Image (cartoon, grey):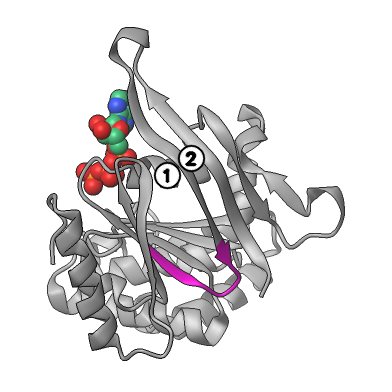
Amino acid sequence: MAEVLRAEQIEKYYGTKDNLKKALDGLSFQVEEGEFTSIMGASGSGKTTLLNCISTVDCVSAGHIYLNTGRQGPSGIMDITEVEQGAQAKFRRENLGFVVQDFNLLDRLTIEENIALPLVLLGLPAEKVHAKSVEMMERLGIGEITSRFPYQVSGGQKQRCACARALIKKPRILLADEPTGALDSRSSWQLMGLLGELNRELQVTILMVTHDSYCASFGKRVLFLKDGRIFNEIVRGKKEQQEFYEEILQVQSFLGGDVSC
Ligand SMILES: Nc1ncnc2c1ncn2[C@@H]1O[C@H](COP(=O)(O)OP(=O)(O)OP(=O)(O)O)[C@@H](O)[C@H]1O
């Protein structure tokens, strides 16, 4: 398997000299193509900071994060920490997909228009945009609600729309930050089932921050953060989901903090 993402000794400090907070403390890990990795840890352990550094929303204080863009030539492996400020939006558009807790859909656009937006921004012709959007909406089970507006659909459908929008341009990695945070339990399990399916069937590489152990058990690996470091890492391997879930709970009991079950 090819490596998609590699973080090497990343550090992140906030604040000033007299009041310095180390949010990431020499963190290193890699994500292989087709992996579904969850990041867990108590509040303040550095999960959001890590995702922000990967997505160029924030910058590291030290260390490097490499992304294998899948392209040939000099832009094949990019050091995310060195993408110039003016080039960050383009970098994100071309390489990353995002799913966040509050969906981030545009209220004035229909479900189909929201999903099509990344392709429109990439300048694809209208017929191609439509065909790809329809295919993606069918795949994600929202083919019936294409012409509705976000306020006319359920939370679960909104999050499916956000997933479709994130995946339509085939990002190298899907970054999900608490994707089930605003959903009820049933919609959460449905969304996680969908992400698991997309990972298995379309080999979508997923890096997801979650507080929820059961959500994490849908993935293949969990990294546990504590005080900005990797405290533990467990892999599902051939285990049943229930067994993996119990293993996650067990690690959490060592971690303490406010990680929910
Ligand atoms: N902009 C900032 N300025 C100062 N300190 C910050 C800033 N952002 C985060 N921190 C601190 O860095 C540490 C890591 O925060 P981070 O938000 O990454 O944790 P988290 O694991 O995502 O927490 P949560 O689960 O509550 O979202 C915390 O101690 C936090 O207070």
Give the x, y percent position of residue 114.
44, 60
Residue type, label 2: Cys
According to the image, label 2 marks what residue? 53
Q: Do the residues under discs 1 and 2 have CB atoms within 8 angstroms?
A: yes
Query: Can you tell which mark lies on residue 50?
Result: 1
Relative to 218, is 42 above or below?
above
- Tell whether 128 sits left or right of 198: right
Q: Is residue 132 magenta?
A: no
Residue 248 x, y percent position in the rendering: 25, 71
The amino acid type of the residue labelled 1 equals Leu
Q: Is mark 1 within 8 Å of ligand 1?
A: yes
Residue visible at 35% across and 60% down in the picture: 232
The residue at 51%/38% (across/down) is 10
Asked which quadrant contains residue 95, the reply is bottom right
> Which stretch did the figure color magenta?
31-38
Number of numbered discs visible in the structure rendering: 2
Tell me where residue 153 appears, x and y as whole percent. 24, 69
